[in-house]
Image: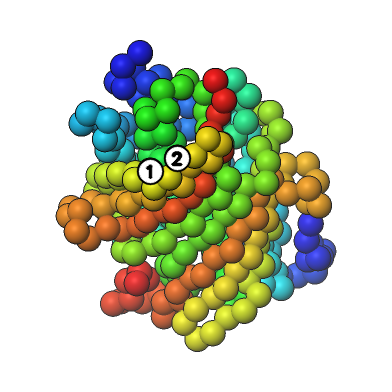
Amino acid sequence: MTSEDHLRAFLERAPYIRFLGMTAELAGDELTGILPFSPHLIGNTLLPALHGGVIGGFLEMTALAQLAVTQSTPRVHKTIDVTIEYLRPGRALTTYARADLRKVGRRIANVHVEAWQEARSQPIAALRGHFMLAED
Amino acid sequence: MSDTNPNLPNPNLDAAAAMATEVPQAAALGFQMVSAGDARGVMHVPWREDLVGDPETAVIASGVVTSLLDHCCGMAITAATGERRPTATLDLRIDYMRPAASRAGVTVEAHCYHMTRSIAFVRAHAWDADPADPIATAQAAFMLAGPVGPGTGGAA
């Protein structure tokens, strides 16, 4: 299976990813998570702004998608812990995210993810997390 | 598990209940308010096929739990202040103890245990069947904006 195959399998596998409306693109082995704006993702109707849980879920799914591509396994890795930092409100715009695999050990991966909208230099949120790698 | 007595009149309940239905993301996920009061909020999300993270196990996605934890923390702040003030999440730390049971809904209790003029500190835990056997715990800090009105954006 190619990286594209692993990514497609990951995106099609989880109903929750379809619920979010998340997609992703690959440049080589580097993945960009893409979350088009949709009204059901709103958490604050006054601004309007994306729900904090939506941003957190999207960041986590981007980390898992990058791991699925890099680890070349159809198994789903398990989230151990995540710390989500919210930097700016998520506007009613498409959101992008990239994951940085800081350390992939035999059993555990440490992953940092950053999300942005109009400018990558102005991230809206970041996630740091540990993931238990699925065994083949 | 909540020490809120649902039989007592609670002026915060309406504002808190509205949070479960008026927010588009909460409505889309099917959040239900269970109780609110005494700086605590309890909310429930029923299991649903389209919210599953891994079809092999039919366990609800962790992202849904993230949304419920974040949302319920906001409800605990509403229960603590007695009004719906715009809040912005500063950070949210979640530890996942174990996956939820297959085809199980999730309940969250959040407690706003300390508040300053501008910051609220909240702890929460999530469970599927037994509050004493959590699937996840969370710790969060929120910035409190001023009362709703012109010129108050609600965000940092």
- In the rendering, at what x and y percent does residue B56 appear? 59, 20
Amino acid of disc 1: Leu
What percent of the width, then of the height, locates residue A28?
A: 22, 29
Element on which disc 2 rests: strand
Name the residue carrying label 1: A101
Mark 2–mark 1 CB contact (< 8 Å): yes
Which residue corresponds to the image point at 32% horizontal and 61% vertical from the top-left?
A89
Identity of the residue drawn at 30% across and 44% down: A98
Which one is nearer the viewer's eye here, B148 or B87? B87
Residue A44 in view (yes/no) = yes
Q: Chain of mark 2?
A: A
**Image depth: mark 2 or mark 1 in front:** 2
Q: Which residue is mark 2?
A: A104
Q: Secondary structure at mark 1?
A: strand
- Alpha carbon of mark 2 to alpha carbon of mark 1: how far? 7 Å
* B32, A129: nearer the viewer: A129
